């Protein structure tokens, strides 16, 4: 129960990400650089205390952490681009298709076995997410397709990040794993930004403030919670519970932007919650 509550805390933190993105004006990759850079600075004292573990880290574990960091950086970049070009609800639910990718890859690559009930609960939750997306009418028609494609691609990257992370967390501590992942995400996106010729500086204090908010709420209280619980909870369960993100996004929209969902969107949210609840129960019984 403790780890499941931490997982819910992570969902709440991550659900604030599109809110901070909407308040920013910097390019998506620049925002990722700021977020990951601030996060690395905030985690540096904790990482320093684990310096012996860093030095003793096996090469295979280090490479897996690096691969996870690359995928996280690509996920952030594509997801932020999606949020900037389509609605918060649509980008959130398309990103949460990662639950299906995680379940499929777990079966194909990690030889995990999912029961019929588990597959049904995942599909129920995803169907609810689709209903939420169809009920949302926001976003420009000219840019919505690009935004939706970026959000969908971000789901592929976060699925890979979740699966690789579940392997890393079996032998690497939370502090070491998250610090290496966040630093690698920073390096990856910085390199892509430099190659693309996008300026990194000169975007004003509001973008630094948005990045700080994401570093604290979305990364340290969000993704770090996912990294922590991956050692104790199945990867498909973690990914499925993340489907609650789209429901939370509606909540932030109501509180901060007075965006009230219609009855169809509410029905979809109920389906998501029901699917997550069913999957959680089945996972505990296995």
Image: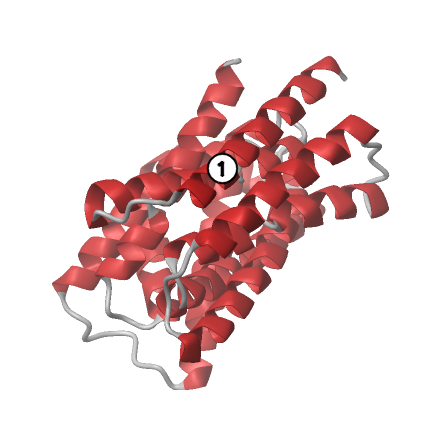
Please name the residue shown 45% across and 71% down the image. Answer: 144
Please name the residue shown 38% across and 55% down the image. Answer: 88
Q: Residues within 10 Å of mark 1 (few under 14, many from 20)?
A: some
| Residue 141 image-quadrant placement | bottom left
Residue 202 picture location, percent across and down: 18, 75
**Relative to 59, does residue 188 appear above or below in the rendering?**
below
| Element assignment for label 1 | helix
Toward the viewer: 162 or 243?
243
**Relative to 179, does residue 231 appear above or below in the rendering?**
above
Residue 272 picture location, percent across and down: 55, 35
Which residue, as the protein is rendered here, is positioned at the far bottom? Answer: 197
Toward the viewer: 224 or 259?
259
Which residue, as the protein is rendered here, is positioned at the far front? Answer: 263
Q: Is residue 67 left or right of residue 50?
A: right
Residue 174 picture location, percent across and down: 51, 33
| Residue 250 image-quadrant placement | top left
Toward the viewer: 203 or 119?
119
User: Considering the image in quadrants, where does the C terminus appear?
Assistant: top right
Residue 29 picture location, percent across and down: 39, 69
**Relative to 110, does residue 277 appear above or below in the rendering?**
above
For the question of whether residue 44 can be seen, the reply is: no
For the question of whether residue 1 can be seen, the reply is: yes
Toward the viewer: 7 or 126?
126
- State the residue position of label 1: 267
Q: Across the whole image, how many numbered discs are drawn on residues?
A: 1
Please name the residue shown 42% across and 70% down the image. Answer: 190
Give the colour scheme of this rendering: secondary structure
Please name the residue shown 53% across and 30% down the image. Answer: 273
Q: Is residue 11 left or right of residue 35?
A: right
């Amino acid at each position: 129960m403790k780890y499941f509550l931490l997982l819910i805390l992570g969902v709440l933190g991550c659900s604030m990400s599109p809110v901070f993105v909407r308040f920013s004006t910097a390019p998506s990759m620049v925002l990722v650089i700021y977020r990951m850079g601030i996060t690395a600075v905030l985690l540096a004292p904790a990482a320093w205390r684990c310096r012996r573990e860093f030095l003793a880290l096996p090469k295979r574990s280090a490479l897996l952490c690096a691969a996870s960091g690359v995928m996280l950086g690509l996920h952030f970049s594509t997801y932020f681009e999606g949020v900037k070009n389509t609605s918060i609800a649509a980008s959130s639910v398309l990103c949460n298709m990662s639950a299906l990718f995680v379940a499929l890859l777990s079966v194909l690559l990690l030889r995990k076995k999912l029961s019929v009930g588990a597959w049904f609960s995942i599909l129920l939750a995803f169907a609810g997410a689709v209903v939420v997306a169809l009920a949302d009418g926001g976003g420009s028609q000219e840019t919505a397709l690009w935004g939706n494609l970026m959000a969908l691609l971000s789901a592929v990257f976060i699925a890979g990040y979740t699966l690789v992370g579940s392997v890393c967390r079996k032998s690497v501590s939370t502090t070491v794993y998250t610090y290496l992942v966040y630093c690698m995400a920073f390096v990856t996106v910085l390199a892509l930004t430099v190659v693309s010729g996008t300026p990194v500086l000169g975007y004003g204090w509001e973008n630094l403030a948005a990045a700080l908010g994401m570093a604290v709420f979305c990364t340290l209280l969000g993704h770090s919670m996912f990294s922590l619980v991956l050692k104790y909870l199945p990867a498909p369960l973690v990914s499925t519970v993340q489907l609650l993100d789209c429901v939370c996004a509606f909540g932030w929209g109501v509180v901060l932007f007075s965006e009230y969902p219609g009855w169809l969107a509410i029905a979809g949210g109920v389906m998501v919650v029901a699917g997550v609840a069913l999957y959680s129960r089945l996972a505990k019984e296995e």
